[in-house]
Image: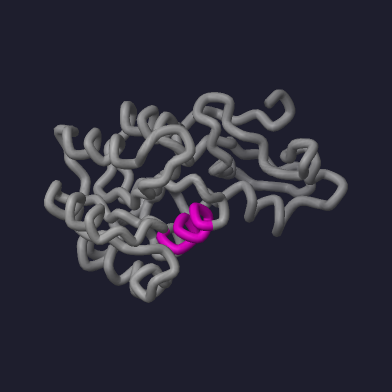
Amino acid sequence: MADILIVEDGVIERERLQDLFSSAGYSVRTADNFDSADRLLSVEACRLCILDIGLSDRSGSLLFEKLNSLKQRPIVIVLTGNPSVHLKRSLIEQGASDFIVKASPQAENERLLENVRSRLGDPRPQATSKSTIALRDFIKNFVLEKSKELFLDSNLEVTECQSCGSTGIEITFSHKLQVPPVVEGLLRCSDCGAVYDPEVS
């Protein structure tokens, strides 16, 4: 079970939230639309969902209804650009724990993190070992410039997972002596767990 599911179609906002909560020690999954969130929820529950209502494929209100119907119903914090008082009242009455308008003081990093901490408590110990890091960080800090393209697509971005479309790839180093420049490890999607092979993706 993940601590937090972020459903947000804006890349910058989604990455901001992912970095905020991951850095605080929470296990985080992300989805950029209704369908990707639906697929994630079919294989893994979450304790809390940060939900944008204005999604690109379907209304986030439909996803909110689905979240409410789950056996393991998560806490839902709506984070939206829609300041409608009527919408806020409606979603709170239906069980949303909070309704936060983007770019408001409540949406700022520290206040949002404190809001989540008050609901989830301190992060649980992570299941992954300390030898697991995000692929983006691995490329940035440990890969030679001429070798970076092995992990990136033609736009110099991490290739999407073929199973779920996420770019949240993590690398877990083999538990044996590592002798650079050869470094052995396993790449997996942090969202669905699928093995990632950058040379064939």
- Residue at 22% x, 56% y is 86
- Residue at 46% x, 33% y is 57
Start-end of magenta stretch: 13-21
Q: Position of residue 140 (x, y in %)?
A: 71, 56
- Residue at 25% x, 47% y is 47
Q: Is residue 81 left or right of residue 201?
A: left
Q: Is residue 170 left or right of residue 84?
A: right
Q: Is residue 14 left or right of residue 197?
A: left
* Colour pattern: one colour
Residue 20 included in the magenta stretch of the image: yes
Which of 94 and 159 lies nearest the eye of the viewer? 94
Which quarter shows the C terminus? top right
On screen, 185 above or below 17? above
On screen, 186 above or below 23? above
Q: Is residue 22 left or right of residue 42?
A: right
Which is the main secondary structure of the residues drawn in magenta?
helix
Q: Position of residue 165 (x, y in %)?
A: 55, 32
On screen, 40 above or below 32? above
Which of 154 and 95 lies nearest the eye of the viewer? 95
Which quarter shows the N terminus? top left
Residue 16 visible in the shown view: yes
Residue 146 included in the magenta stretch of the image: no
Location of residue 182 by image quarter: top right
Which of 95 and 161 lies nearest the eye of the viewer? 95
Q: Position of residue 145 (x, y in %)?
A: 84, 52
- Residue at 49% x, 53% y is 14
Which of 168 and 96 lies nearest the eye of the viewer? 96
Q: Position of residue 5 (x, y in %)?
A: 36, 46
